[in-house]
Amino acid sequence: MKVSLEWLREWCEWEGTATQVADQFTRSGTEVISMRSTGSQVPGVITAKILEKKPHPNADRLTVCQVDDGSGPRQVVCGAKNHNVGDIVPLAKPGTTFPDGLTIKSAKLRGESSEGMLCSAKELGIAEGAEGLLLLPKETPLGVPLEKLFPGETVLEFEVTPNRADLASMEGVAREFTALGAKRKDRGPIQAPAAGPLTGWRVEVADPEDCPRYSLTVLSVKAGLDSPDWMKKRLAACGMRSLGLLVDVTNYVLLEIGQPTHVFDAAKIQGTTIQIRRAKAGEKISGLDGGSHEVNPQDLVIADGKGPVALAGVVGGKESSVEAGTRKILLESARFHPGTVRKTARRLSLHTESSRRFGRGGLDPALVERARNRVISLLQECGALEKMEGTLTVGTEVNKDPAPISLRVAKVEKMIGHPLDAKKIQSRLTALGFEVKGEGWIPPSWRGDVREEMDLIEELIRLENLDQTPSVLDPLAEGESVEDREDRRRRRIRAFLTERGYTETMTGSLIRKDEGTFVKLSIPAGPEASALRGSLLPGLLGSAGRNVSRGMADLKLFEIGRVAGDKGREEFRLALLVAGRERPVDWQDQEEKTGWFSLKGVLEELRSRFPGIPAEMKLREAGAAEKKQASLKIPVWVAEVSLGSATAKLAENREISSFPGVERDLALVLPETIAYGEVEKAIRTVAPPELESLTVFDRFRDPAGAKVPKGSLSLGCRLKFRSPTLTLTEEMVNGWEKKILESLSARCQAKLRGVL
């Protein structure tokens, strides 16, 4: 929302600079995201008259002009095409400096001398885009500085949050400024001619939920009238260009009080019935935005006897638009369902000022009648209104008796942290439009977002000067939230993986519906973002494909992100991917390929270091279809695991024994079909607590069967025993070894290699 401070002064009185005003709003939660000045931005540019114009002898696109600024003629070379002899234009003399640092100098252009530069509106900062020179009225005196003809004003741009629809207007900003300490000016009620009943026209609303209230007014107007300069200036300051009086008035009212309205040319309407209905299959509309839009049954349209003449709350139709010669208009002021308008605007990428306000929701229901009366009042003020034929309104009335919201002063003081006078509370809430009733407060019709006591407290807190509020630590406050702990845990996991040579990737959570598992979005953000991903692997494989296509075939990638888990619930997951070599090697070493064990090892270490990661690990080689989707032709291994929730885990602290340990090596021969896990289980089942470690130091198979029988393998296991309280004896260790060998024989058919 762009707000001219000069326009705001018509609503409020205040002291201070524009920067101070912006700071006040930002501190109260209404952020000012930019501040700029309008008018001529180049000091020293003056008006001049073109006396002579001729083609440049050495350049087809240039002209040589003789101009006079009142001090005598001078020659200027110009590249514009829209000027003629007798035009009054801006002239920048030699020595004039522009905001970008350019300084005009006397020079020769293609052999012709040039004593200055003729300027466009864009070069002077008067307009954001303009073609050709700025042509001034013929009666403009010569030698007048442009800053006098186009005095500047300061424009603030506000970031309006979705819950504050009331701030998308000058009236709403003025109310907010009044609560911040400015003095509100009395503007009086809107004066408009009394509207009688409209005859000869009908309004049909198919579904009251789509359009709770609709007002149609028929007006006879004078043709060909232009908007007054003050209105054009206000619109330009807020980023709108003048489109003729009838359209400018509706745009002005939209900026002033926040309610979109629309005017139709009555002569272009087929029949005398206006329908507010859902679109029919196959219907199209040519919009005022210049596009042809195919509508569907999800869209709400305004239709006449022929078909749609406007997309409700989004954009008007070109075929029913008003022109300079329009003599009779239909004035529309209505309320539309926010979700319906928002879906249509998003699907068609039509983000107009009207759709932003309707789509946000929360518009004051009373604005339907007020906006209608304000448009009529302005048309009358500008001399365009000839006759008011009547008004027809359908829909529900405004609820004028909402329930009061209780407010406890003690609760307010506890939330703010210091005592707050009851009179101060009353003055601030009253300035925002709230009314006291008994022990509670009734929110105004334009603040539908205020529903409970905490909402009232938030209003008071944001209006409080927090710089002067003492900082007090609540003894009951928790030092760290669950979200903080989870975030810190994910940071540690990232650091852990990075230290092990993995690179983090980041992909979008919205995907196409053909990219793996997904949860469909009811309102797609676009063809490339129609679903919420159900897995991180498609995105990770896509990143791998792009890296491989650029010559990076040795990959260790990971991603941590949200996915749609069980029953559509969001959860954080970790995905890993490896491909190519395990690590770079030189000519002396043998290359080792990544694979299943690469991921298994890092996942096991993750589980041991970060409690809460489940034991279930989806570790596999990427399938052919997945690799084809990602344009991969090399073997790729992937894993995906839920990060779960962090659980408290006490660190183990075990003192190292000061007694010596004893090692025993067992060279076992066992069937090659026996997995090592069975061997380890057989040993640990009967091993004493003194077994400190178990490692495998050799694995051998003899295909010929000479040293080890065919179908068997030799496995070298090293057992280390140590006691924390005494020195082990030979008899103790021999007894443990005997039990272990008996268990291996019974469970794994294993024997010592030397006794075969």
Image (cartoon, rainbow, N blue to C red):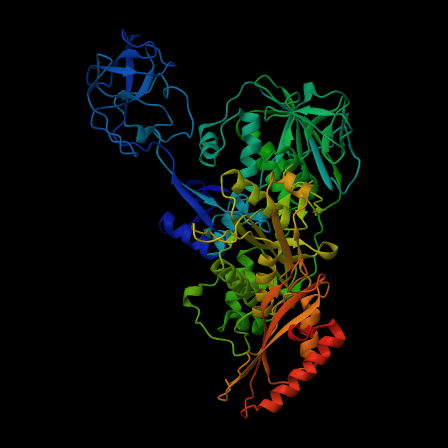
The vertical placement of 543 against 352, above or below, is: below
Q: Residue furthest bottom?
A: 726
The answer to which quarter of the image holds residue 215 is top right
The answer to which quarter of the image holds residue 141 is top left
One can see residue 564 in this view? yes
Q: Nearer the viewer, residue 733 or 34?
A: 733
Residue 545, image x, y percentages: 57, 41
514 sits left or right of 610 in the view:
right
Residue 705, image x, y percentages: 68, 61
One can see residue 182 in this view? no
For the point 67% across and 67% down, the residue is 676
Q: Residue furthest front?
A: 706
Position of the C terminus, as image quadrant, is bottom right
Residue 182, image x, y percentages: 44, 53
For the point 67% across and 36% down, the residue is 344
Residue 656, image x, y percentages: 50, 84
39 sits left or right of 318 in the view:
left
The vertical placement of 528 against 665, above or below, is: above
